[in-house]
Image (spheres, rainbow, N blue to C red):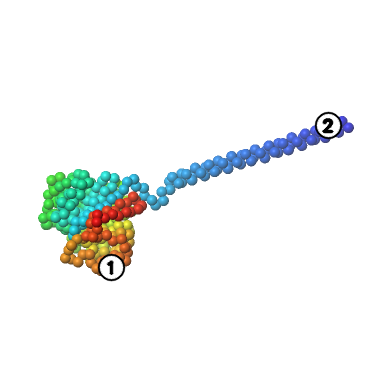
Amino acid sequence: MKSLSFKINRHFYLCFIILFLVALSLLSCACSQSSSDDAVNAQMSSQQNVDNTNDTSDTKQVDAELEVTFFDVGQGDSALVTCDDKYLLIDGGDSKKSSVIYNDLDKRNISFLDYIIITHTDSDHCGGVSGALNRANVGTCYCSEKKASSNAWKYVIANLDAQGKDITIPAVGDSFSLGDATVTFMAPSKIGTSDNNNSLVCRIDYGNNSFLFTGDAESEEEEELISSTFDLDVDVLKVSHHGSDKCTSSTFLSYVKPEYAVISVGKNSYGHPGSSFLERLKKYTSKIFRTDESGDITFKSDGENISVSCSR
């Protein structure tokens, strides 16, 4: 009886040990799987963080603010672009408006213009640049040509000479940085058949916002832009030639698709802005601003959003 009892006890302890080892093995596997899962989850989380860090989508990062002010210079064009304490003047209106440009730069305490773009040599675009050159030195001055016969142009050249500067004629596709903004020349690719169709056309990109300056470009130069590889779709369009009926065709507008349009215009005998032009423009945007009605018009961009304010 004692021998039988010993055998039963031995079998009992043997079974107990086997069950204990099986339980221990299962527990070890569970812990190992949990640790493995945690490692995988940590790796996935780490990879997701890397992916999120590298994912900039289509957003272009900018660190400051872009400001574009269209000056009320009557029947002419002039705009000041500022970004990261860098300054670009596009045209200056007529010679009679030199004091307007001078006084604005003086009020802003601007003594150096990084760039000046004179879209073409017509006096209502180049004349007031002399006022700017009397107030500030310039880094680079662009124009579509170097020679013109008007007195307004001769004064501009004289003021540039006094600073030891010359006109730079850009090629299509040339660009430069203005702080975090990029300015690209889009036209003309050839000498136009008129001064208007020889206007420098430039696009300013800042983050996901964009501006298009067209000088006095007429249908000839608009067709050149349409047939080019440049992206014409912009947020803000400075319409050509003060809103002439000869400019800013429906086809051109269908490519540009502006959210805002600016007409730089004053009292004139040309019928600017034309009724046909206004009818075309209103089909594409209701946000139309005129310097003869609103005075100075200022756009501010943070690279995503645009706000507008007017001096009157």
Quadrant containing the N terminus is: top right
Upstream in sequence: badge 2 or badge 1 = 2
Question: Which residue does the image show at 28% across and 50% down from the upper left?
Answer: 67
Helix, strand or loop at mark 2: helix
Residue 203 makes an appearance in the image: no
Q: Mark 1 points at which residue?
A: 279
Q: Within the image, what quadrant is residue 229 found in? A: bottom left
Query: Outermost residue toward the top?
Result: 2
120 vs 183, left or right, is left
Q: What kind of residue is marked 2?
A: Phe
185 vs 40, left or right, is left
Q: Name the residue under label 2.
A: 6
Helix, strand or loop at mark 1: helix
Question: Which residue does the image show at 11% across and 55% down from the upper left?
Answer: 151
Residue 163 in the image: x percent, y percent?
A: 15, 45
Q: Within the image, what quadrant is residue 214 found in? A: bottom left
Of circles 2 and 1, which is in front? 1
Q: Nearer the viewer, residue 99 or 33?
A: 99
Query: Outermost residue toward the bottom?
Result: 276
Q: What kind of residue is marked 1?
A: Glu
Quadrant containing the C terminus is: bottom left
Residue 222 makes an appearance in the image: yes
Residue 56 in the image: x percent, y percent?
A: 41, 48
Image vertical order of residue 1 relative to residue 133, above or below: above
The CA distance from mark 2 to mark 1 is 111 Å
Question: Which residue does the image show at 18% across and 60% down from the upper left?
Answer: 75
Image vertical order of residue 70 relative to residue 23, above or below: below
Residue 276 in the image: x percent, y percent?
A: 25, 69
